[in-house]
Image (cartoon, rainbow, N blue to C red):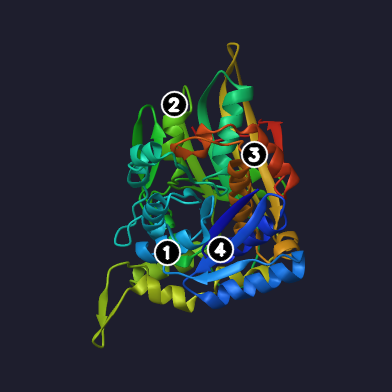
Amino acid sequence: MGKVVIIGAGGVGNVVAKKCASLPEVFTEICLASRTLSKCEQIAKEVKKNYNVDIKVEQVDADNVSELVTLLKKYKPDLVINVALPYQDLTIMDACFEAGVNYLDTANYEPKDEAHFEYSWQWAYQDKFKEKGLMAILGCGFDPGVTNIFCAYAQKHLYDEINYIDILDCNAGDHGHPFATNFNPEINIREVTQVVRHWSDGKWVETPPIIEDGSVHFTFDYPVAGPRESYLLYHEELESLVKNIKGLKRIRFWMTFSQNYLTHLKVLQNVGMTRIDEVDYEGCKVVPLKFLKALLPDPGTLGENYTGKTVIGCVFDGKKDGKRFKKYIYNVCDHAEAYKEVQAQAVSYTTGVPAMIGAMMFLTGEWKGAGVFNVEQLDPDKFMEALNKYGLPWEIVDFEGNLPE
């Protein structure tokens, strides 16, 4: 049905490649490309063993537009699935535009020299992608991604207007390491040490980062996982949902962190290991966070002994036919089950499966258009069906718990 090039062979790239290979009637040709060819070759070997599907592998520098264009012109895919680093979103979009290829990613662009998360750089491609008849699908992981789809589904089927949304992300798993990050350490640590923002009454409200005094947190009773301390955090899907959900008065994002994680992170920040600027060390320029990344466990290796579950979802508060009520849509994913299926932990799984589903929506014609789209702008129904079918089943319940005002 369609050809894809997957760029990135980390934990998420592994999941995307294997889930695509499991649907050969949809993904008729798959190429996996990364700066590290050996990672691609290992995934291809596992794909052949598990699914008896041959995928092609290529080495490419995702920072280099001309290399990317050469790759895309060689394979002529219908779609690029970008699961490389967020720093590389724009070079990959540039290459897709030049080669005439459609685009999908799981996280928004951020510059290397600043921990700043904003869609403006990618939204700026709207006119030229539209004029060329190309589609760019932004943020098709879990959060952003599935959380946006939950919002679109609630807006379409449950409410006339949604006034309050709280996105709640809980990882109740145990990987057995004193300190590790569940996805790329650079991106993870930049994300959680930034100033926090949420939308309220028509403006962005700032609060301190999660490891500083004055951070906002509360205890939420998650399905399956139970009570967990949840910290207010800025996350990129807030920016697009503010634009696309009708009647929204407030939207917040919460994530669980253990005290052990916060203590390690605070110490690392205090000694300067989370800095993203270069420092001079014995005549060499070194970025402390990049060096720290080299010391920490590779997130792609955490799955084998990972136990526990992730619980991610959205609480909605809005009105239908003048009646106000609250609903909670959420997914529970098991680390051990994810590893059994695709040799990955649940954080990689919950990002990779939606990327495959989004690609499938495009290749089957369920999602079509020219320009740049966040996933809540697209029809959620078939995507929601596919989540249940391909490993991320969801529940909708009446919400009767408590959230901070």
Q: Looking at this view, is 122 or 231 the one in front?
A: 122
Q: Looking at this view, is 143 or 24 the one in front?
A: 24
Q: Going by the picture, which residue comes out furthest to the top?
A: 322
Q: Picture coordinates of residue 22 (x, y %)?
A: 72, 57
Q: Alpha carbon of mark 1 to alpha carbon of mark 2: how far? A: 46 Å
Disc 4 designates what residue? Answer: 182
Disc 3 designates what residue? Answer: 383
Q: Secondary structure at mark 2?
A: loop
Single out the mark in the foreground, 4 or 2.
4
Q: Secondary structure at mark 1?
A: helix
Disc 2 designates what residue? Answer: 249
Q: Alpha carbon of mark 4 to alpha carbon of mark 3: how far? A: 25 Å
Q: Alpha carbon of mark 3 to alpha carbon of mark 2: how far? A: 26 Å
Residue 156 seen in this snapshot: yes
User: Type of residue at label 3?
Assistant: Phe
Sequence-wise, the earlier of marks 4 and 3 is 4
Sequence-wise, the earlier of marks 3 and 2 is 2
Q: Is residue 119 left or right of residue 172?
A: left
Residue at the image position 60 percent from the left and 28 percent from the top:
154
Q: Picture coordinates of residue 307 (x, y %)?
A: 71, 64
Single out the mark in the foreground, 3 or 2.
3
Residue at the image position 46 percent from the left and 30 percent from the top:
244
How many tags in the picture?
Answer: 4
Q: State if disc 2 and disc 4 touch (CB < 8 Å).
A: no
Single out the mark in the foreground, 4 or 3.
3
Q: Secondary structure at mark 4?
A: loop
Query: Dot 2, how many residues are within 10 Å of its Cα: few (below 14), some (14-19), or many (20+)?
Result: some
Query: Dot 1, how many residues are within 10 Å of its Cα: few (below 14), some (14-19), or many (20+)?
Result: some
Q: Is residue 244 left or right of residue 354?
A: left
Single out the mark in the foreground, 3 or 1.
1
User: Type of residue at label 2?
Assistant: Lys
Query: Dot 3, how many residues are within 10 Å of its Cα: few (below 14), some (14-19), or many (20+)?
Result: many
